[in-house]
Amino acid sequence: PQDVGIVAMELYFPSQYVDQTQLEEFDGVSAGKYTVGLGQSRMGFCSDREDINTLCLTVVQRLIEKNNIDYRMIGRLEVGTETIIDKSKSAKTVLMQLFEDCGNTDIEGVDTTNACYGGTSALFNSINWVESSSWDGRYALVVAADIAVYASGNARCTGGVGAVAMLIGADAPLIMERGVRSTHMQHVYDFYKPDMASEYPTVDGKLSIQCYLHALDMCYEKYTSKAIEAGIRDGNSTLDIADGIIFHSPYCKLVQKSFARLLLNDFLRDKNPDFQGRYSGLEALRDIKLEDTYFDRSVESAVMGASKELFATKTKPSLLASNQVGNMYTASLYGGLASYIYSEKLESIAGKRVILFSYGSGLASSMFSLRFSSDKSSGGALASLVSSLSDVKERLDARNCVPPQEFDSNMKLREQTHHLAPYVPVGSVSVLTPGTWYLTEVDSMHRRKYSRQ
Ligand code: ACO
């Protein structure tokens, strides 16, 4: 098969959020810490009516209905998530109830977990399946979904929740580029979830940032070498071959720093850097070592200044969902991709290349690129991909703003009732947007029952 990639995609986030300015006040931190310091405006969250299974059910059914897809046309379905409510039964198997009416049970794939990386692993597996001898001509479906919640304290404001579903097939409008995929994996304890009874991770915030930036350097170096070998990087800068660069986004400020770091990588690799143009003001950084600069403020501000305009065109548009919803863990990178597509028009997006960086603590990370097809026809696959995401901002704006007090009591309720059985959720059903799946009951044997709004 040719041009294997993303045929259609859908983004789902719950109907309520807390305002980060109000949260700063509620948490008693200095004004601007979350909004300016971390770059976040709103944080999405869900009540006890939604869990990992409802997020997946909702986003898959929306994708299928919006794109008029026959459930029998799916031959592989894989979920990437780190929101684990069962140590054995996968969220994928819960999704099988959507296929009951059409009788399709012949669907490969189960769940994939490693922090925020599971969605990328599921995507790679699905692309590989379509390119392999196992492929039977049908679509693969990739779901990335998570509820990102932290214990009260300095990490809580970097939570969020969301889900992305992507239909994978041949002759796609958004094609995975071959020969350049690059990976860096390593054993570290930066963010992990050893407490099976709690929804919260154990986090070493500073270490997690250092690991993220190191993984970024490693993946970019390998991606660059492969891009040179593949003949798609002919100049002196990898940034220049990408129209868009999309990052896993724990919070927007880290992404802006990461973008600046890519410019620094390009600069250090460049044998003849242009100090009059792009690299003006960076003369003093010529001999620095990347591993000495993770938290170096003077290096950071010099490269952030030098990369400001490139960041505004290549990456900022992809931060809409991250800024408005927060970290969606596995769905964060793909929420960035959906935001990027939302920000473009059919005429301008055709033929463009985007580079993506996926990071999951622990750690697993990859960099890869996708190319939009050049088909500008109004009835074409690219046109329908672009138009299917044209409502993202409208849906973000239509959510309900909930006061921090209410968000806080919701978090306490989740803590008290997490894994409780039997349990009947108390969250409002009427606030859910039409088409949202919700939990109706957990019985004494921990069996969960769901309904659709
Ligand atoms: N106005 C403007 N900026 C401010 C203000 C203010 N009033 N107050 C603080 N700031 C700035 C700080 O200077 C800092 O900026 P800098 O990073 O450029 O130095 C920023 O706001 C954050 O302040 P810190 O004091 O560094 O924040 P803190 O250490 O309390 O927490 C952290 C930040 C570590 C990100 C925490 O929220 C966390 O642990 N989050 C979860 C882990 C995470 O997301 N890691 C990223 C990769 S791993 C993953 O994806 C889960």
Image (tube, rainbow, N blue to C red):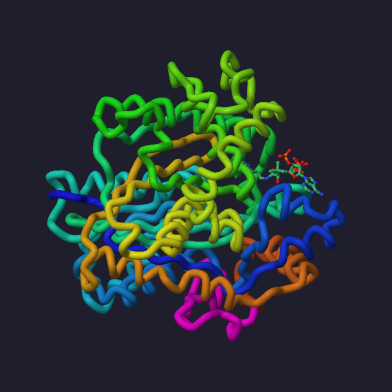
In-front residue for pair 90/287:
287
Residues drawn in magenta:
427-453
The answer to whether residue 354 is above or below residue 230 is below
Q: Position of residue 198 (x, y in %)?
A: 65, 52
Which quarter is ligand 1 in?
top right
Q: Position of residue 361 (x, y in %)?
A: 55, 38
Which residue is depicted at the point 67% across and 40% down?
Answer: 203
275 displayed left or right of 390: right
Q: Residue furthest bottom?
A: 430
Which residue is depicted at the point 16% across and 44% down?
Answer: 132
Q: Residue furthest top?
A: 287
Tell me if residue 89 can be seen.
Answer: no
Which residue is depicted at the point 42% across and 71% down?
Answer: 390
Q: Position of residue 114 (x, y in %)?
A: 48, 42
In-front residue for pair 181/451:
181
How many numbered tags mark residues here? 0
Q: Position of residue 155 (x, y in %)?
A: 71, 48
Which residue is depicted at the point 32% across and 44% down?
Answer: 124
Q: Quadrant of residue 219?
A: top left
Q: Residue furthest front?
A: 276
**423 within the magenta span:** no
The answer to whether residue 355 is above or below residue 379 is above
In-front residue for pair 113/226:
226
**450 within the magenta span:** yes
In-front residue for pair 305/225:
305
Tell me if residue 285 can be seen.
Answer: yes
446 displayed left or right of 371: right
108 displayed left or right of 1: right
